[in-house]
Image (cartoon, rainbow, N blue to C red):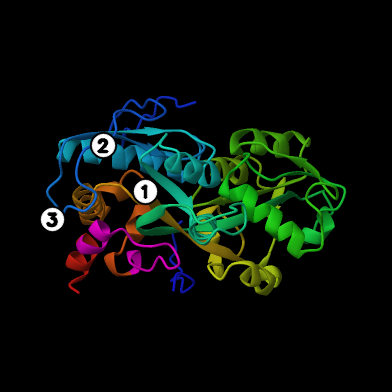
Amino acid sequence: MIASIRNRKRGLAVPVAVTAIALVLSSCGGRQDRSTGDATAEGCEPTSAQLTIATGNSTGVYYVLGGGIASLISSETPIRATAAETGASLQNIQQVVDGSYDIAFSLADTAADAATGTGSFTEKQPIQALGRIYSNYTQVVVRADSGINSIADMRGKVISTGSPKSGTEVIANRLLEAAGLNPADDIQAQRLDLAKTVDGLKDGSIQGFFWSGGLPTPNLTDLFTSQPDVARFLDITPLLPRMQEINPVYAQGSIPAGTYRLGADVPTIVVPNVLVVKDDFPANNACAITKLVWENKDRLAQVHPSAGDLDPVIAQDTDPIPLAPGAQEALSGLAGD
């Protein structure tokens, strides 16, 4: 099951620029021409298509890695891929289902909710996974002078819960509820993207925030490098048992001290990320794209180190999110199944 996390020590559309290893693309938002191909076709030979990849906030790993993947696909196949900044997980799934995007990054808890028709979804959504990628680390940061030592201490405080309809917001609200707080009434919730959130913490207008992302996250690197005495992390693992009652994908992990030049590792809650598509995505292109991404993890790791966690064996562990048949063919071949 997807809950079996292996912890690893890594940690509107706008133009996306990825300079690492000369992967450069210009993105445009929304759906382009519907990708061509047969949803039931076998084999890994890609057919010409134009597709878009829904990523996340411009300061997060989704955005950077999504740009790298789009450029890789465009340079190595007849598929022309672009990447777009979005609000992330929940919005991404909704827009893959409605046809606005073709491939999307999502936290596995949000995608599992979609696949099972729970949480934010009132019915099962027609999605499949291309594979499980790296894990996100739940990073809960507060001002050192805030008096906040646990999630329960956030009562009455000004807290950023992340961008609207993001995976961060989903996890933030669940953690608050697990701590006995009502996100709508018990905190002064600010639904801000990460850049505005970190700026608010620095100037004191925000007393704490939630962020779910890979390691390292550039905005947090800047925060702890430029103002190391202003902020500190919370250990949220006491809430893990309650979180696992909501969704079994949650697991324990830790943020290595060296990630942000901390004094010690920070215990936290981790959740895998997945790449998702609608269930009518052409099988041959699903196979070709999956094979290309997992075969080129070293190249993509130069765009962001989180790509170094790509593993064709772990990638198949997406339950309860169905694995796309084409992706299954590619990953099984790479894993030597």
Where does the image place residue 204, in percent across and percent down from the top left?
Answer: 78, 37
Crowd rating for badge 2 (residues with CA inside 10 Å; few <14, some 14–19, many 20+): some
Q: Callout 3: helix, strand or loop?
A: loop
Q: Callout 2: helix, strand or loop?
A: loop
Where does the image place residue 117, in percent across and percent down from the top left?
Answer: 55, 58
Judging by the rendered image, the residue that carries numbered circle 2 is 35
Task: Tell me how far mark 2 sits from mark 1, CA to CA.
Answer: 12 Å
Q: Which one is nearer the viewer's eye here, 40 or 187? A: 40
- Please report whichever mark, 2 or 3, sits nearer to the chain's N-terminal start: 2
Q: Is residue 321 visible?
A: yes
Task: Tell me how far mark 3 sits from mark 1, CA to CA.
Answer: 18 Å
Residue 241 against residue 149 in the figure, above or below = below
Q: Which one is nearer the viewer's eye here, 258 or 114? A: 114
Residue 239: image quadrant is bottom right
Q: Callout 1: helix, strand or loop?
A: strand
Judging by the rendered image, the residue that carries numbered circle 1 is 277
- Please report whichever mark, 2 or 1, sits nearer to the chain's N-terminal start: 2
Point out the residue furthest to the right here: 156
Which disc is residue 221 wearing? none
Crowd rating for badge 3 (residues with CA inside 10 Å; few <14, some 14–19, many 20+): some
Residues at marks 2 and 3 touching, judged by CB atoms closer than 8 Å:
no
Residue 51 against residue 337 in the figure, above or below = above
Where does the image place residue 227, in percent across and percent down from the top left?
Answer: 66, 41
Residue 18: image quadrant is top left
Q: Which residues are magenta?
A: 314-329
Badge 3 amino acid: Gly
Q: Is residue 134 magenta?
A: no
Judging by the rendered image, the residue that carries numbered circle 3 is 43
Badge 2 amino acid: Ser
Residue 48 against residue 155 in the figure, above or below = above
Crowd rating for badge 1 (residues with CA inside 10 Å; few <14, some 14–19, many 20+): many
Q: Residue at x 21, y 35 (%)?
A: 49
